[in-house]
Amino acid sequence: MTPLPFYIVDVFAEKKYAGNQLGVFTEAGDLTDAQMQTLAKEMNYSETTFILSTETRNGGYDVRIFTPEEEVPFAGHPTLGTAFIIGQQIIGRPVEQVILNLKVGQIPVIFSYGREGPDHLMMKQNAPGFGKSLDGGSMAQVLSLLKDDLDNRFPVQEVSTGLPFIIVPLKTMQSLKRVRLDMDKLLKFAEHLESKAVLAFCPQTHHEQNDLCARVFAGYYGVPEDPATGSANGCLAGYLLKNRWFGESRIDIRVEQGYEIGRPSLLFLKAEENKGKIDVFVGGKVIEVARGEFV
């Protein structure tokens, strides 16, 4: 195999190696599916992305996303991290927006700039789809909690903006810290659900300037606990707005994630109603931390 250039970026991180790292291959057009899957396994990040061409198609760049186990149609931090590399390394000048052509469809990423380059990026996700309310008592057992740990003012609910998650509202940080996901119970609970991953959250935070604290469990996709998850938080944004968590018809909040595994991350969430649908935006910082060639 010809040496392949790649970049490693840190997404949603307040400092290097605190957020969710990502490998991005920029010259992947000649790779087979099997080669991309092998490279994703070798890189061993939660996801690795492959830019298929430096030329646009229908205004966007063709990109594929692989976990070490399988290809996925959408994932949040790979979308932001790949758009960052396209802006910096392929376009090479300040841009307002980069569009990615993903399996789930076209996802636009909006750039904001500071003195030293891109300050943070925001992506508009697909409009969220909502499943039925799920049994809170059974979900509590999946998370090794008591039913009383759940905030029963709001539903346990499956939500998807391209990759589905079960959203679980908890009352306190103490409950959130006690979560221990039982994968066997989850697979039984979610046997007839599209989602096999969970986002649990609470209104208490480690830092007062933030609004919510979340934990994401995606062991089904090879990530027992994820430090920063854009796709899951997009689902959370839609959930919060639909269920009027903050009592308003729009939200603009900061969500902590990753503290329990020592990789504190920060995500910016926005959502608003627009012509009967919910527009969801997820963003954060992206930092390049390394580059090299895979041989």
Image (cartoon, grey):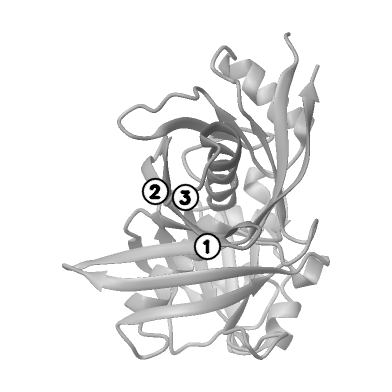
Front in this rendered view, residue 217 or 95: 95
* Quadrant assignment, res 273: bottom left
Which residue is under mark 1? 283
Can you give x and y, in whole percent of width and height, for residue 180 in the image?
A: 74, 68
**Mark 3 neighbour class, 10 Å CA radius: few under 14, some 14 to 19, many 20 or more:** many
Can you give x and y, in whole percent of width and height, for residue 222 in the image?
A: 69, 44
Which residue is under mark 3? 163
Q: CA distance from mark 1 to mark 3?
A: 17 Å
Can you give x and y, in whole percent of width and height, for residue 22 in the image?
A: 69, 44
- Residue in view at x 55 percent, y 50 percent: 80
* Quadrant assignment, res 256: bottom right
Going by the numbered disc 1, the residue's amino acid type is: Gly
Instruction: Specify the quadrant that holds the C terminus.
Output: top right
Which of the two discs, 2 and 3, labels the residue nearer the N terminus?
2
Q: Is residue 134 visible?
A: no
**Mark 1 neighbour class, 10 Å CA radius: few under 14, some 14 to 19, many 20 or more:** many
Relative to residue 252, is residue 290 drawn left or right? Answer: right
Going by the numbered disc 3, the residue's amino acid type is: Leu
Which residue is under mark 2? 108
